[in-house]
Amino acid sequence: MLVDFEPDCFSSTESRSTQESTEHLFVPFGGLENPSDDFSSKERVAEYEAGPYKGFADDVMKGFASIVPPDADVSAVAEAIVKVVDTPFGKRPFRVHVDPAQDGAEVVNMVSDRVRAELLPRIGLADVLTPRPLTSPLQKTA
């Protein structure tokens, strides 16, 4: 099982994972003060800071920090992963949200998941919506 912390709601990884017979868990996290380095590409920040968005990145970070509950704990992400790993193959959820700030990402991802579930069968890719057991020795070692 792969665990992915990508913020991208409809990445090619999501679709490929079941074609490769891999259960793939997406754990979008939010409402935790800077748990990753997603917002800190120094080159990109420098570009924006030199233009009309001067100070915007700081405003965004301050805004996010202001909605994080004081008792938010990053270990909740690890606990969510452990719970999913303990769930049997084929029964695991596709995505688990850990978002103490309730910033709306869960709603956005639910819509994205619904669109994916409706679109993929229409374009002949329904098989990527569910994991398949490994069938070859090569797959089992991957």
Image (cartoon, rainbow, N blue to C red):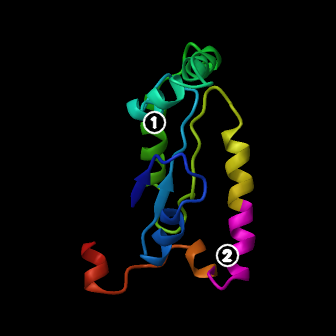
Residue 78, quarter of the rendered image: top left
- Quadrant for the N terminus, please: bottom left
Residue 85, numbered circle: none
Compute the Cα span from label 1 to label 2: 29 Å
Q: Is residue 26 left or right of residue 109?
A: left
Q: Residue 21 vs residue 142: left or right?
A: right
Span of residues in magenta: 114-125
Q: Return the residue found at the far front.
A: 51
Residue 19 visible in this rendered orientation of the protein: yes
Residue 11 at x, y percent in the picture: 54, 60
> Residue 142 appears in which quarter of the rendering?
bottom left
Q: Quadrant of residue 102?
A: top right
Q: Amino acid at mark 1?
A: Asp
Viewer-proximal residue among 34 and 54: 54
Residue under label 2, please give it.
120
Q: Residue at x 43, y 75 (%)?
A: 21
**Image height check: is 83 above or below 115?**
above
**Element carrying mark 2:** helix
Q: Position of residue 127 (x, y in %)?
A: 58, 81
- The residue wearing badge 1 is 38
Mark 2, other Cα within 10 Å: few <14 / some 14–19 / many ≥20: some
